[in-house]
């Protein structure tokens, strides 16, 4: 088997005294779709943000496409061009229209000429089904449309890997489906994807692997059938039961081994 | 207990009701206003006022120079000062946000000094103290250069703080999105953060332009040639030659001719920017 697309070795991350990641080892192969699930504060978003160095790891190494991201001498901007990132809050550029959001990064970062950038933008807008919104401003779009534009913007840079940080958590429930459909299609096309999510149906259907994190460590890592369908650990079972049927949860004491009280 | 509560809440039988009281109070305020206007109209010496402030021939005599020369120079001084202030202010704002301590410190000192000094003192400094201290050094552009420098030095301090606040008001996610697309910090600042920051600070920045427009009158103290006079100097000169205040009034109206439309434009831009951002 060829070298994994994403490789994380002995990753630790602390915010002050708060140790959010306590030794993560993870490999994601080329074309693999990995969903990271876990309670809030388990460190899953921090792990994702360490992969493109939006957070600086305290210890450990991260490789993407064979390049060490954590090497202090690495050209981080060059590495990030190969990693697409999609945020919970979309983070579209509000001062640019949809086309501008897609073309400006191509032109400023990749140095593409105007025509090429416009063509790539149009292709990727079509890919997320929003060709008719090319001239709209982000503020006039729904959350689901904004998120699809954000995905198209990342894709326009031609990334090898896509990172998704709770891409549907800020959306109204009826808008989640459109975004997941785009992600499902992307997965089918063979994109390497690392997805932090609470969408169990998506994880079950689309993911090649599901990683369950709790308290800054990986508790379980395996096929969706195993991790979601037949979890081996009590913590996973507990988390899944609360997630799948929140109305049935009992009032309980604080779980002491949770690291953070909220997502950083 | 219950008795007193009831009496305070119920309208009293005697005296005025609350509604009547309100009406009386409002009527009194109008009455005072009308009385003041009448008192002014009766006591003012209208003939003398007109003679002193609104002499048509003197006003006519000011045209077209008051526009083609004085207003033009005022605008020119203001804009050149604004450009210098904006560029310098931008540099100072970025220094203030720098990760290098001495830059932050230096920018802080600059801002405190130039915000704390009267603009007039800066004009004297640039116009008199610098040429005296460094004989032979010539500020390029003559009077125009001196004014641009003096106004720029003063306004840069204010603008730096405004720009810094604008940059910090852009959500953190914007920088993260730009960086994860591969923008370097500098490129992200130039293409993503600063354009949004300027949208946010457009109103306070234009307010600064209006302030500069008025401060340009301090050119008076630099000693200017006839061709370099701006509105205030022009008005004052003519007022003393004609021994009449009409030129002052006309010069004042010329200032308003610019500042009032300007604040109107700002309000329109403000609502438009609001739309675009969210």
Image (spheres, coloured by chain):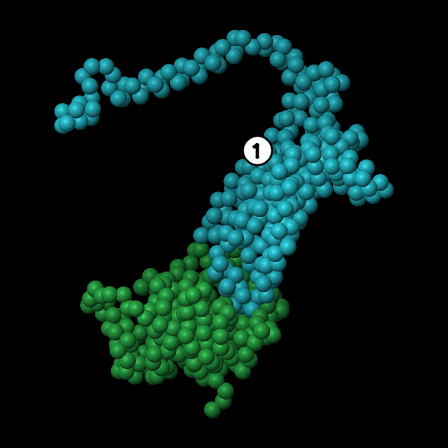
> Which residue is rendered at x = 17% and y = 27% of the image?
B5
Rendered position, A135 above or below B141:
below
Q: Position of residue B9 (x, y in %)?
A: 20, 26
> Which residue is rendered at x = 31% and y = 21% of the image?
B22
Q: Secondary structure at mark 1?
A: helix
Q: Position of residue B148 (x, y in %)?
A: 72, 41
Q: Position of residue B235 (x, y in %)?
A: 70, 24
The residue most toward the left is B2
How crowded pointer 1 is (Cα within 10 Å; few <14, some 14-19, many 20+) is rated as few
Name the foreground residue: B157 vs B184: B157
- The colour applied to the residues of chain B in this rendering is cyan
Q: Quadrant of residue B127?
A: top right
Q: How many marks?
A: 1
Q: Quadrant of residue A219?
A: bottom left
Task: Using residue A41 as the reference point, say whether residue B176 is left or right of it.
Answer: right
Name the foreground residue: B58 vs B204: B204
Quarter of the image that includes the N terminus of chain B: top left
Rendered position, B196 above or below A184:
above
Name the foreground residue: B90 vs A140: B90
Residue B139 seen anywhere in this rendered image of the structure:
yes
The letter of the green chain is A
Rendered position, B121 above or below B182:
above
> Which residue is rendered at x = 55% and y = 37% of the image?
B263
Q: Chain of mark 1?
A: B
Residue A137 seen anywhere in this rendered image of the structure:
no
The residue most toward the right is B136
Please give the residue where the numbered disc 1 appears in the rendered image.
B260
């Amino acid at each position: 088997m060829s070298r994994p697309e994403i490789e994380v070795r002995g990753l630790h991350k602390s915010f002050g005294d708060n140790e959010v990641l306590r030794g993560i080892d993870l490999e994601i192969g080329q074309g693999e779709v990995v969903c990271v699930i876990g309670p809030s504060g388990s460190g899953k978003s921090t792990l994702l943000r360490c992969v493109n160095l939006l957070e600086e790891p305290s210890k450990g190494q991260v490789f993407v496409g064979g390049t060490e991201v954590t090497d202090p001498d690495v050209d981080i901007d060059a590495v990030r061009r190969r990693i697409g990132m999609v945020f919970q809050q979309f983070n579209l550029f509000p001062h640019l229209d949809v086309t501008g959001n897609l073309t400006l990064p191509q032109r400023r970062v990749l140095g593409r000429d105007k025509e090429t950038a416009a063509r790539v933008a149009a292709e990727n807008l079509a890919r997320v089904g929003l060709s008719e919104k090319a001239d709209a401003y982000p503020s006039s779009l729904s959350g689901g449309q904004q998120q699809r534009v954000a995905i198209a913007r990342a894709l326009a840079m031609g990334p090898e890997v896509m990172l998704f940080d709770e891409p549907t958590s800020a959306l109204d429930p009826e808008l989640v489906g459109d975004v997941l459909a785009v992600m499902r299609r992307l997965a089918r096309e063979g994109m390497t994807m690392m997805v932090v999510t609470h969408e169990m149906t998506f994880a079950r259907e689309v993911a090649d692997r599901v990683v369950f994190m709790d308290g800054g460590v990986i508790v379980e890592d395996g096929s969706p059938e195993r991790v979601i369908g037949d979890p081996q650990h009590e913590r996973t079972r507990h988390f899944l039961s609360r997630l799948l049927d929140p109305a049935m949860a009992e009032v309980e004491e604080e779980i002491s081994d949770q690291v953070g009280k909220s997502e950083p | 207990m219950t008795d007193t509560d009831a009496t305070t809440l119920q309208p009293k039988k005697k005296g005025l009701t609350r509604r009547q009281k309100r009406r009386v109070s409002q009527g009194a305020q109008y009455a005072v206003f009308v009385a003041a206007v009448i008192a002014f109209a009766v006591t003012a010496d209208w003939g003398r006022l007109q003679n002193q402030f609104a002499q048509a021939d003197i006003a006519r005599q000011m045209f077209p120079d008051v526009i083609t020369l004085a207003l033009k120079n005022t605008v020119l001084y203001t804009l050149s000062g604004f450009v210098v202030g904006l560029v310098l202010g931008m540099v100072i704002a970025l220094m203030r946000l720098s990760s290098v301590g001495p830059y932050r410190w230096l920018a802080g000192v600059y801002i405190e000094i130039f915000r704390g000094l009267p603009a007039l003192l800066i004009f004297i400094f640039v116009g008199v103290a610098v040429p005296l201290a460094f004989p032979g050094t010539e500020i390029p552009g003559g009077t125009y250069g001196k004014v641009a420098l003096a106004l720029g030095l003063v306004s840069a301090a204010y603008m730096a703080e405004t720009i810094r606040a604008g940059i910090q008001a852009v959500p953190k996610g914007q920088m993260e999105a730009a960086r994860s697309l591969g923008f370097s910090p500098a490129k992200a600042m130039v293409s993503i953060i600063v354009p949004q920051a300027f949208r946010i600070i457009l109103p306070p920045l234009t307010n600064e332009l209006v302030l500069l427009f008025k401060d340009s009158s301090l050119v008076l103290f630099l000693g200017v040639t006839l061709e370099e006079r701006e509105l205030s100097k022009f008005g004052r000169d003519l007022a003393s030659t004609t021994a009449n205040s009409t030129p002052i009034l006309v010069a004042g109206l010329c200032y308003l001719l610019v500042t009032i439309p300007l604040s109107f434009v700002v309000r329109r831009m403000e609502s438009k920017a609001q739309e675009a951002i969210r």
